[in-house]
Amino acid sequence: MSDVAALELRDVHVTYRTREGPVPAVRGVDLSVFAGEVVGVAGESGCGKSTIVSTILRLFPASATVTGEVLLDGENVLTMRWGRMRAVRWGVASVVFQGALHSLNPIQRIGTQLVEPIFLHDKLATDNSAATKVRTLLEQVGLPARHADAYPHQLSGGQKQRVMIALALACDPQVLICDEPTTALDVMVQAQILELLIGIARERSMAMLLISHDLSVLGTSCDRVAVMYAGRIIEHGPARAVFDWPEHPYTRALSSAFPTIGDAASRYAPSGLPGDPPFPGDLPSGCPFHPRCPSALPVCPTVDVKLLPAGPGRTAACVLVDQSVPTR
Amino acid sequence: MRRASTVTTPRKLSPYAIARTRRKKSLQRFAQAFFGQPAGVIGLVILSVFVLLAVSAPLLFDREMLDITKTLGNESLEPPNGDFWLGTDENGRSILAVLVWGARASLVVGLAASLISMVLGTLIGIGSGHYTGLAGSALQRLTDWFLVIPFIPLVVVLAAVLGQRGLGTIVLVLGVTSWPGTARLVRAQTLSVEGRPYLERAKVLGDSDWQQMTKHVLPNVMPLVIANTTLTVAIVILSETTLAFLGLGDPFLDSWGTMLDKATGAGAASTGAWWYLLPPGICVILVVLAFTLIGRTLEVVLNPRLGSE
Amino acid sequence: MAVAAAVRAADSDPEPQRPARGGQQGGLGRFIGYRLVAGLGTLVFVLLFNFFLFRMLPGDPAARYRAVKSISPADLAKIRDELTAPLPQQFVAYLKDPLALDGISSWKGQPVWDLVQGRAWPTLVLLGATTIVAVVIGVWIGIKAGWNRGSRFDKVSTAVTLLFYATPEFWLGLLLILLFSTGIGFFPGIFPSGGVIDSGIDPLSFEGITSIADHTVLPAVALAAVYLAEYSLIMRASMVDELGQDYLMTARAKGMMDHMVRRRHAVPNASLPTITLIFLNIGFIIGGAITVETVFSYPGLGLLTFEAVSEQDYVLMQALFLVFTMSVIVFNIIADIVIAVIDPRIRT
């Protein structure tokens, strides 16, 4: 495996200009995903995880200011020319969007939508080769080839998400970004879709970024996870370790927000977090988590903690980490 | 938008006082939103000018100036000059005076007919949305049927069939023909309100149909109705102009449409009497534009689903 | 192996509707059938409405025919018998001939059909010209303004279209006559102000067609301005609605150029409401041309309506009103079918 990451974010900041003033949605994120690796990003809604997705293919609205570097195979997408950008979109990295319900054009047949990126990125494609490719793609995601003639509304939510995955694979990208790919699906279907996605990524040794609000899902299926809060990564490390032994109080709250099957105690004391995540335009001082933190110290409102080493391959942004490192 | 909660514990207030302050607050919020929209403000300013003109017409120009038996001494179809700023019509009347008095006719007809249309449309719309049985579907069919009847031919034919043409006839004709659009809109909104839990609750608690419709549905469709009625006023004024232009208006009422009818009769277009043609048309455009701008702004402000831009 | 497992599991995923090509065609056929039946219901209502509307008249309906010299006393007696018969009997007679094709116009003393027939084609010419101009320009403006919401083009075009929307079309007609027919100041009086064709020319010859075009330009522009405004406002609103849709983000992420995203994805979806409106309006323009045809003495069905009203010819009025209403019903049905063909969601 090459030592250049397939996807790397370096000190990425995203600020939206709004009528109420600038809103910093992402405040300095560093993250890399190597080929063959599945990296998860977890966090509540509004923590900036979907904003990160929009930076990777430069799909953010004009009201956003993005600084830092977003490197795809070493190439910075933020400074790319538009022509190169269009070639990179879907050719190098593709996205499985959240809510497949609306991510497909309602009045075009599935086949037409699958063929579109093929012709766009492969100048040598013929009608025949594209049709064959569509059939293969649909089979790969477990759909019969006849679905190419269907319209999106004729498919179930899970089938639509499968189409979305087939679409994302149409140009054999190196990087696959999945933005809440299983939200709005039935629980059973969620598991199937996730299994399919991870399986495909591993099989093709793609670099995959998996965004979800469900830390338990990421903990079981990813290699590494990053937990985001208020526009920053506040904990990062091997997936299993982060999920099983969270260092940051927020991660702890997030991992126990979902009851562990078989653990009776977690059912009787579901420790949800009090309050809502802060509004990005109006963050609390110091550690932005301190108003909701069950183990906040008097120093927390004044210290803006950076990521600190917290065990093998792990970092966490909490003043408590300093003391806890030697004990574990 | 989420902010740190700054709710102070309320002292014991009567429910009415709470409702009053809440209403005042939402009114303030509404005003702020409305005046944040330049289009709406422009519409309001234009409309205010015309309302002012209409109200003060007797102060500006004596009613006598419209009486053609009193204006025989003036030259007819005189271009604008020092005495008559907008010139004279074929009877030697000051076009400016007729124009200002015409504002009254147009506004009165527009508002009165829209009121009829609003009441009819709201009643039929809520009824067809609330009653699920035969009555509801009958009202819905009726709305659908009236929607396909071409408006202008209907108005023209109705005015022609009704014969004697007074202000009341015109208002009636325009009022009873322009409700289907409102009814359809109100019906859709009623259906969405009917699906909400608090209506379920009202039903369980035994509210009568009338109570459900007046206490719960009506307040919810009212904002939409008001925005829609404002747009209806614009259409009604245009239609009144059309009717009057076709000679189907009140012959004793000098509306802007009547002026255009008379101007055509006097050959203003073919003789180049632009001062007779332009002012009434421009006035119609401005007033219709004003109501359209206000109506569109109300739609945006009162219906957050449409988005603020 | 994980993939294989997921593939097998896919069949447990409920499938709401089986996509099969034959089924879709059947859906469309059923939809059209349903739509035709509903249209028939509307037609029955309109026939009833039309019947009673014209039975509200006060006075002796036959008296109006006395002024027509060409009617013999025997015919007059027959007309009186028909018009004063009991309502049920009148209704039966009406149903036999709802358009009153054999009815005698009290204005001209001619069968109504002869009058309507001769006046239909100028209205169709005007309708065609108006629709083409209004649709092409209006939709173009709407797309451009909506796609670039907030741009200067958007602001200016919205202001101008709102102004046109508020303009009475006949007043615009009068203004056009003043400027381009009478001619005033710098404006050349180059267009005729009345009629549809210069007399004595075969309408199907080259001269005939240019003469018709010459006579149609001004009324078509006057009518088109209003409808153009409506189309562009609706199209703009639909485009703005589509802007936030997720599938546009997908299209952009695929690496499509902005104008391709617009043409291939945004416009087809956004055009659905406008297409409905265009077809509906075709029905409405036929009747809405009354004032413009009157202003330009354009001898179509609109001018005929005005003449019927001025001459108080109720038989003619009734026939015209039914023609207008039926054209709306027909185009209503066509609109629904066209939408069903474009939008697969409608027909299921």
Image: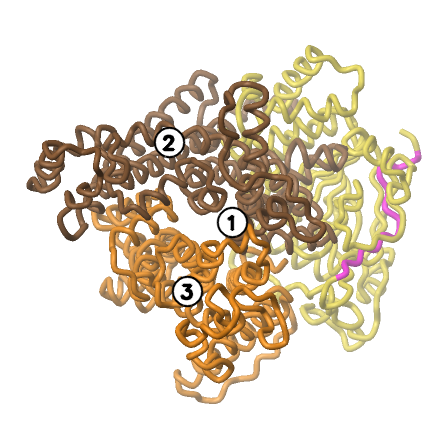
Chain colours: A yellow, B orange, C brown
Identify the amino acid type marked 3: Gly
Q: CA distance from mark 1 to mark 2?
A: 25 Å
Which chain does tag 3 point to?
B
Q: Are marks 3 and 1 in contact (CB under 8 Å)?
A: no
Residue at label 2?
C330
- The label nearer to you, 3 versus 1, is 1
In the picture, measured across the screen, residue B259 lies left or right of residue B178, that is right
A14 magenta-colored: yes
* SS assignment for the magenta stretch, majority: strand
Disc 1 target residue: C169
Q: Percent from the top left, x then y, of residue A112? A: 63, 23
**B134 horizontally vs C245: left or right:** left
Figure check: B66 above or below A236? below
Q: Residues within 10 Å of mark 1 (few under 14, many from 20)?
A: many
Q: Residues within 10 Å of mark 2 (few under 14, many from 20)?
A: some
* Kind of element beneath mark 3: helix
The amino acid on which the numbered mark 2 sits, given as a three-letter code, is Val
Instruction: Please provide the residue range marked out in magenta.
Output: A3-17
Rounded to the nearest angstrom, the CA distance separating label 2 from label 3 is 31 Å
Q: As shown in the figure, which amino acid type bears the numbered disc 1?
A: Glu
Circle 3 residue: B110
Q: Nearer the viewer, residue B81 or A203?
A: B81
Residue at 64% x, 48% y is C183
Whichever of callouts 1 and 2 sits on the residue coming sooner in the sequence is 1
Q: CA distance from mark 3 to mark 1?
A: 18 Å
Chain ID at mark 1: C
Q: Can you tell which of label 1 and label 2 is closer to the viewer?
A: 1
Return the chain for callout 2: C
- Viewer-side residue, A186 vs B98: B98
* Quarter of the picture holding the C terminus of chain C: top left
